Image (spheres, rainbow, N blue to C red):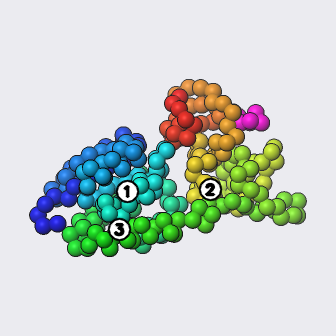
Amino acid sequence: MSDKKIRVLIVDDEPLGREIVRAMLEHETEIEIVLECENGKQAIDAINTLRPDLMFLDIQMPQINGFDVIKAVGESKLPYIIFITAYDHYAIKAFDVNALDYVLKPIDPDRFAQSISKALKVIKNKSESEFNQRILALFDSQKPSDTYLERISVKSDGKIFLLRTSEIEWIIAEGNYVSVHISKRSYLLRITISLLETKLQPNKFHRINRSTIVNIDFIKELVPMFRGEYQVILQDGTSLKLSSRFRDNLVKFLGGLF
């Protein structure tokens, strides 16, 4: 790379996410931010035209996610990538092997600094083709059936039942257990809600408050309350609370703003 500045692209659908990354890069004299993109299409266009050296890429974006961006660009134009994600169930171990680095949201400044240091060393000392081969190999290790649960086993009335996760309507935490609700019945599982969340399809199951996950396929309507909170009404009439803290994450997957 000689003495040229490393040209950086920031891709995140959330303005705050882009702002945080930009602020953390401001003091990096070896880095030049060439563009910020708010969606996958913009990212693909920017990579094809600007040919950045490094990209901070959010994974969870509507319509065209981070994986789709990588697939669309292809090996010949693929920059070095640091993944940015709010979820640690996106095969983080695979990222550690196949990607340059990853940073979890909310971003820890020290962790981010480590990632930048690693990126600078790799970009200066390693060939682009070697990295591209490793990052594209990521997709061979991304098997949805291996990543997310399709069925769970529960014990009830002395019997063991196999439940399809697609049939789960909502889940509520009960200490180190969760209560899984399906068709007006509930089943108790010995697992924390945070761990179970990492094992469920992120495009279907969403945390709506600290203790509740809902399957968006079963949402009937949202009723405004106060201070940005909503009642989530399910198809069977169950009413749950959507807290303002979790509202924006749910909005993306319901096809509109509220």
Q: Is residue 206 above or below residue 156?
A: above
For residue 164, side relative to residue 128 (left or right): right
**Three-letter code for the amino acid on which mark 3 is drawn:** Asn
Circle 2 residue: 200
Q: Is residue 46 above or below residue 120?
A: above
Tell me which corner region of the image, top left, top right, bottom left or bottom right, holds residue 208: top right
**Three-letter code for the amino acid on which mark 1 is drawn:** Val
> x, y percentage for residue 41?
39, 45
Q: Which is in the foreground here, disc 3 or disc 1?
A: 1
Circle 3 residue: 132
Label 3 neighbour load within 10 Å: few <14, some 14-19, many 20+: many
Choose the circle earlier in sequence order: 3 or 1: 1
Residue at left offset 26%, top offset 50%: 49
Number of the label disc, if any, that sits on residue 73: 1
Q: Is residue 84 above or below residue 252?
A: below
Residue 216 at least partly seen: yes
Q: Which is in the foreground here, disc 3 or disc 2?
A: 3
> x, y percentage for residue 24?
27, 51
Counting every numbered tag in the picture gives 3
Residue at left offset 32%, top offset 73%: 130
Q: Nearer the viewer, residue 135 or 117?
A: 135
Q: Is residue 124 above or below residue 27?
A: below
For residue 240, side relative to residue 154 (left or right): left
For residue 45, side relative to residue 28 (left or right): right
**Range of residues picked out in magenta:** 233-239
Q: Evaluate if marks 3 and 1 touch, with contact meaning CB atoms under 8 Å apart.
A: no
